[in-house]
Image: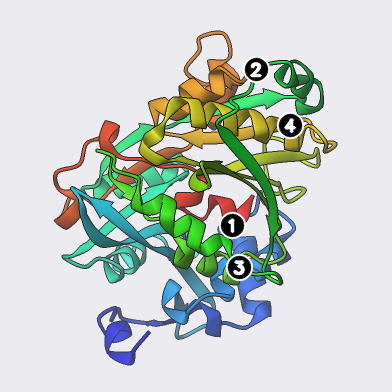
Amino acid sequence: MSDAELGELRLPDYAFVPARSVGDDDLVKFAAAAWPERPPYERVLASWWRRGDPSCAVAAVHAPSGAMAALCAARPSEWVIGGSPVTGRAICEWYVTPDHAGKGIGKRLVQHFARPERFLYAFAMSEAAAVNFSKLGWKGPYTSTLLALPFPRVARLPMSLLPRSSALKLEDHVIDPHSGVGALAADFDRIEQTRATAFARMRRGGNEWAWRLTVCGERQYHICLARRDGVPIGYVVVRRMTPGASRILGRREGAIITDLVAAADQPAVLRALARRAVAIVGQWDVVVLLMATTLPTHRRALAASGFLSSNWPVVSRVLGRAAPIFMWAPTGPGAPLTADYLALTFADSDVDLNL
């Protein structure tokens, strides 16, 4: 992040700096002021942007007091919109402390990440953030679908009795920041090249996975790769949730489907991968397996695998309140988009890096 870029953020009494440069004590004090209902405040020290490039997060510091007043982080990504590649940033960790609210700091921070050629969006934001994004002219808010499979250990038993496709070969892999993405990078690239879809979506090739592993901390990803005739055609990614990271689960153990991908969104491949995700997580001692998505193909594959949906009236009171909401800036690449054209999962923001 250059001095010239930060210089665009001039505001009386405030200095704008890379958030990574803020000391640990000041970050913890900021966390206590910005979200007092979310202890332990030291958790902010494990934020993904502290391991990323300095340009990923900006902090506003109140010059007279030296106190950190605001934070805005933006997850970098590459997107395909209308068949063309564009850069993207997911706005996340957007907070202004109560003592410094109403001075335009938050607006300045979001505008810092805006570029004419960039797709700017947010996924899994708070209702208060949605109100502020609306004031900036963003589209939405819209609600994604949250799908939940209670007690995967029990659910995997009937799943194991379902017929399997002999044409699909499923391979299990485990990756983490220490192992790196390895040979899977080429498979991810191959699958990405075959994803001819009408949806606006984030690119999920080897480079994206290599970046994610540099900022994810000590997270471990369990990946099932699907091949047909030796050719990779899809994958599902699951992992344990960080204990205490979910306000819904508290200290109870949970797991998430980080991503579910198939070439051309083939229903049979998505179903096979969803059921393999249940089989993997069913070996763990967790109370629920979750996935958030905006894609109908995902919803159908997971529903066929026993998942409950926030779109169903019977469970909407519980899952509906927790379903992530999303918005985007209707400028540049985002101008022609509609909510049903946008493909989003936990992997498209920092949710995967927080839960």
First in sequence: mark 3 vs mark 2: 2
In front here: 128 or 170? 170
Q: Mark yes or no: residue 102 visible.
A: no
Secondary structure found at label 2: loop
Residue located beneath label 4 in the image: 279
Amino acid at circle 1: Leu
Secondary structure found at label 4: helix
Amino acid at circle 3: Gly
Secondary structure found at label 3: loop
> Residue 353's mark?
1
- Residue 355 horizontal/vertical position (percent): 64, 49
Closer mark to the observer between disc 4 and disc 2: 2
Separation of residues labelled 3 and 1 (CA atoms): 20 Å
* The image quarter in which residue 318 lies: top right
Separation of residues labelled 4 and 2 (CA atoms): 14 Å
Residue located beneath label 3 in the image: 182
Name the residue rendered at 67%, 16% in the picture.
Answer: 162
Amino acid at circle 4: Ala
